Amino acid sequence: MYDKNKTVILLLILAAVLVQIMGMTLPFTGDAGKYAAISKNIYQSGDFWNLTIHGSTYDQKPPFHMWLSAAGFFLFGGTGNFSARLFPLLFSLLLIFSTYRLTKLYYSELAARLAALFIGTSQIYFFYNTELHTDVVLTTCTTAALWQLATY
């Protein structure tokens, strides 16, 4: 049986993912450039504990996001835009899934799909994934933890 709502939601999610993939080649600006430079320093030095940028210690943000970008550099053997954005993008996909599962615990299937669609196509979601920001990792970890706590 053909379900029009399911098809529309899946097409919108597919469109959102494609936009994210296309945005992975944009150059870094502002804070994203700083986070990418810190990740590059991790990759080049192999030091995951002492974060530096231009020779100065960096202790402004939690390091997990920079570690994820550095892991992309190690995985692909270089410091490109795609490598830096891959693992944060995977985390943002986990955010969509965690939102879906958390909502489904308390509400209907349709509400869960719509919640996942709303978060996955929101403007801030696109912004945080085309740039490198620590917020998407923080939001993902918080949402996944709440989902797991509610499941427990």
Image (cartoon, rainbow, N blue to C red):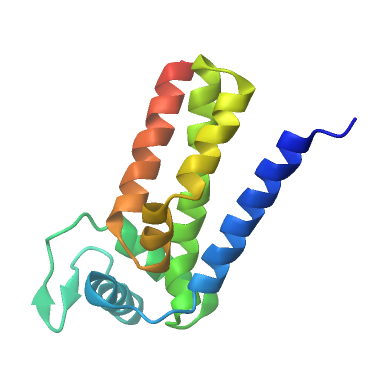
Which residue shows up at 34% across the image and 36% down it?
142
x and y percentages locating residue 79 in the rendered image: 42, 82
Q: Is residue 27 above or below residue 148?
A: below
Which is nearer the eye, 36 or 120? 120
Question: How many marks are shown on the rendered structure?
Answer: 0
Q: Residue furthest front?
A: 4
* Viewer can see residue 142: yes
Question: To which quarter of the image does residue 10 belong?
Answer: top right
Along the viewing direction, whichever of 106 and 75 lies nearer the viewer: 106
70 shown above or below 61: below
Which residue is at 32% across, 79% downward? Answer: 40
- Rendered image quadrant of residue 139: top left
Judging depth in this view, the residue of 109 and 141 nearest the camera is: 109
Expressed as whole percent of the image width and height from the top left, the position of residue 19 reads: 55, 65
Specify whether 36 is left or right of 77: left
- Residue at the spot x=45%, y=26% of the render? 147
Q: Is residue 113 above or below residue 94?
A: above
How far across and how far down the image is residue 148, in percent?
45, 25
Q: Considering the image in quadrants, where does the N terminus appear?
A: top right
Residue drawn at (50%, 15%), measured in percent from left and top?
106
| Residue 84, above or below 5 | below
| Left or right: 53 in relation to 65 | left
Q: Residue furthest right?
A: 1
* Front residue of this view, candidates 36 and 52: 36
| One can see residue 74 in this view | no
| Coordinates of residue 26 in the picture (x, y in percent) | 44, 79
